[in-house]
Image (spheres, rainbow, N blue to C red):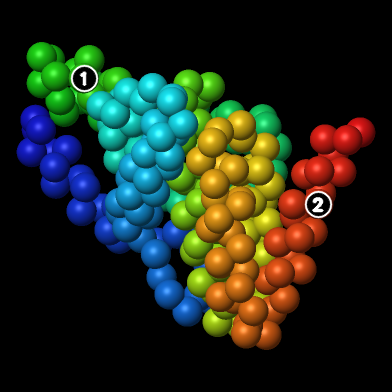
Amino acid sequence: MGIHTYFQSLNDLERIIRCPGKFKFQEHSVSAHSWKVVQYAKTLADIEESNGVAVDWKKLYEITSSHDYGEIFIGDIKTPVKHYSLELRAMLQQVEEGMVAHFIDENIPEEFKAIFRRQLREGKDDTVEGLILEVADKLDQIYEAFGELQRGNAEKEFVIMYRTALIKIKGIKLHCVDYFLDRILPDMVSEGSKSPIDIARITDEALSSVEAHSQK
């Protein structure tokens, strides 16, 4: 009982593998994903600040470092399944949030309950910090998928993951998104040019689909 239970539960995140059930050249745990999201978010926030945007760093660290804690209870559900419908996504989120709330009620000392509820909540929202979390989360999906495509992994799910995350990022209005699209993504695509999979074509098609949709 107590915070010891919370600390001990963090080990479980190391054993939950992302994108389960598919061949991968490199496995990624939820724990590693969470660490990378924090690293991405730091740089993304720095880009925002360099453009005059105020960032609440305490909130940013809280929501990025804990954003997938609930997967301890439900595991990592494949992205295509998770986003099959808004209704399914809402149901999964409700289950995850309910189990996190129950865990806090059962294990966290009363004087820290409110803090844990704030830190372990769903952090993606329309605030600058929530949007940075969204971009950082999708950025890691892009890099995970890119790593597989670059090595020639033809599993369709990684093409979908790469494309879906890129489309999502393109639709978020932040300075760091513009920086990623203009300065980072071209380096990534250039690095992947030797892959047997045409990453440049997949990238261009994804970005073009966003532009075509916005012009309708």
**Residue picked out by circle 1:** 115
Q: Quadrant of the N terminus?
A: top left
Q: Quadrant of the C terminus?
A: top right
What's the amino acid at mark 1?
A: Ile
- Is residue 76 visible in this depiction of the protein? yes
Q: Residues within 10 Å of mark 1 (few under 14, many from 20)?
A: few
Q: Position of residue 195 (x, y in %)?
A: 63, 82
Tell me what residue is drawn at x 53 percent, y 58 percent: 184
Residue nearest the observer in this picture, 153 or 127: 127
- Is residue 158 visible in this depiction of the protein? no
Secondary element at tag 1: helix
Q: Position of residue 48 (x, y in %)?
A: 44, 33
What's the amino acid at mark 2?
A: Ser
Q: CA distance from mark 1 to mark 2?
A: 43 Å
Residue nearest the observer in this picture, 19 or 186: 186
Tell me what residue is drawn at x 12 percent, y 15 percent: 110
